[in-house]
Image (cartoon, helix red, strand yellow):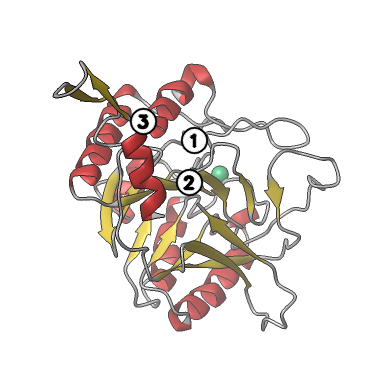
Amino acid sequence: MKETRMNRRQAGKILLGGVGGVVLDFQSSAAAAAFDTWPEFSFLVVTDTHIGYKNGTAAEKRWRNTAAELKDAQGDFVLHLGDLVDRGNETQYPVYTKFRDTIGKPFYEIPGNHDPESLFKQYIDQKIDRSFDHGGVRFLLFNNARTDSHDGFITPEQIAWLKSELEDAATANLRVIVCAHVPFHYNRHPDRGWYVKPDNGQTAFYELIEAHRDRVLAIFHGHFHNGIRGWDDRRPVHEILFPSALYNLDRGLMAKEAPGYNLPEFRPGYVLATFTGGKLILKYHVTGEADDGSIPEKALTW
Ligand SMILES: [Fe+2]
C-alpha cells in the first residue's frame, strides 16, 4: 500500500530544465497520500430502522432486538445511515433513542429521507453535517436526503464543507470514509433509480472525491433496503449500500446483470466492519440468527 502510493507520488513529478532544474509536483498534496500503517479496528453499521413502520410496532421490536445485539457485538462505535423513524413520525424518535441508548457505544446518525431535519436536530443532534476521527480514519457524515424525494441532493455549501474536511484530513494524514443516506452512484432499472442526479450536485461531489481518491476509502449509504449492495467502478473508492435493520428486498439484481455486486442475503440485519490486513471486511449479521457460516461477507480491497 505504502509503496504503491509513494510510487504514484514519484510519478507525479517532472524535472524541467535539465541538471539543477525545477521539480514541479503536479499532484495536489491531498492526492499524494502516503500511509505507514493500515487501520486496525472494528465498527458497526446499521440503517433504515423505520421505527413506526406502517403505524405498527414490528419495527420497534426489531430495533429493540437489533440494539441488544449491537450492545454485545464487538465494534468501537455504531454508524446509523438514516431513516431512523418512518415518515418523520415525531412520536417515534423517543422510541428510537430509548433502545439506542441501551447499546452503550458511541453512536453517529445521519438523517434519511424519512427524517425531517428539524426533528433530527431536536431528538438526535443539533449538528447534522459533522465528522469524527477514529484509528486513523476520518468519518464524514452529512445529510443528502430530503423528505419530499427519493433522490439525493448536495448543496454548494456542503461541497465547500466536505472540501475543507478533506483538506484537513490530508494535513492530518487521515484516510476518509464518507457517509450519506442516498447513493451518488448512477443506478437505473432493475435498480431503484434513486441517486444524486448531476443537476443535484453529483458532478461536483465526484470531482471532489476524485481529487482525494488516494485518501477516500469508501462512500457509505443506506436507503435501498437491498442487503449489501455496492459498486467498485470508481476504485480505489468503493461505494456501498448497507442492509436495512427492518427489511430488505431481493430484487434479483445479479440475475438481471445489474452493475456492481449484491450479496445473496436479504434478511434484516446489520454489518460488522473490520479493518485488517489491508482490507475492510463487511460481515453481514442477520438479527436473531446465529451465523452457521452461510451468511456472506464482502472484503473490500484497495
Ligand atoms: Fe431512505
- The mark that comes first in sequence, 1 or 3, is 1
Name the residue that disc number 1 marks: 147
Q: Is mark 1 within 8 Å of ligand 1?
A: no
Indicate the amino acid at tag 2. Answer: Gly
- The mark that comes first in sequence, 3 or 2, is 2
Q: Nearer the viewer, mark 1 or mark 3?
A: 3
**Whole-percent x and y of residue 209?**
40, 34
Tell me: residue 164, above or below residue 137. Answer: above
- Distance in Å between CA atoms under marks 1 and 2: 8 Å
Q: Secondary structure at mark 3?
A: helix
Question: In the image, is 274 to the left or to the right of 226?
Answer: left
Name the residue that disc number 2 marks: 88
Identified at 52% across, 79% down, the residue is 69
Q: Quadrant of residue 292?
A: bottom right
Name the residue that disc number 3 marks: 211
Indicate the amino acid at tag 3. Answer: Ala
Figure quadrant of the N terminus: bottom left
- Distance in Å between CA atoms under marks 1 and 3: 30 Å
Q: Secondary structure at mark 1?
A: loop
